Amino acid sequence: MKNKILIISSEFPPGPGGIGSHAFNLSNGLSKRGYEVIINTKSDYVDKNQEDLFDIKYSYKIFL
């Protein structure tokens, strides 16, 4: 059984920002080490052409 890690970030690629880049690099590194990484972020900058870069298993819309 893989260990699971949840990363919560206000930014994530393809959106701009240093925090998003760090969350992306951290998630890639942990995934390569055998962890199952779950990312919780917003999707202000969703580009349908770039969705294939990520293995998106679940996508939920939350309205506040």
Image (cartoon, helix red, strand yellow):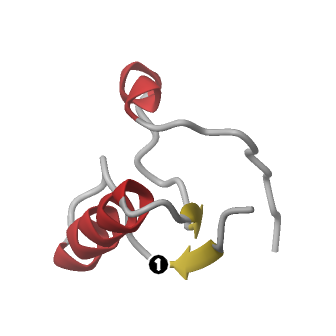
Q: Residue at x 39, y 68 (%)?
A: 30
Can you say whether 14 is above or below 42 in the image? above
**How many marks are shown on the rendered structure?**
1
* Helix, strand or loop at mark 1: loop
* Farthest residue, direction top: 49
Q: Hey, which residue is sitting farthest left in the picture?
A: 18
User: Left of 48 or right of it: where is 57?
Assistant: right
x and y percent of residue 17 in the render? 20, 70
Looking at the picture, does residue 25 appear above or below residue 46?
A: below
Image coords of residue 63 (percent x, y): 82, 64
The structure residue drawn at horizontal position 30% and vertical position 55%, both measured from the top left corner, is: 15
Report x, y in % for residue 3. Answer: 65, 73
Most extreme residue toward the front, as rendered?
Answer: 1
**Quadrant containing the C terminus in the rendered view:** bottom right
> Residue 59 in the image: x percent, y percent?
73, 45
Determine which quarter of the picture holds residue 29.
bottom left
The kind of residue tagged 1 is Ser
Graded by Cα atoms within 10 Å as few (under 14), some (14 to 19) or many (20 or more), the crowding at tag 1 reads: some
Q: Which residue is mark 1?
A: 9
Which quadrant would the N terminus be assigned to in this image?
bottom right
Q: Residue at x 39, y 65 (%)?
A: 27
Comparing 1 with 18, the one in front is 1
| Viewer-closest of 36 and 59 | 36
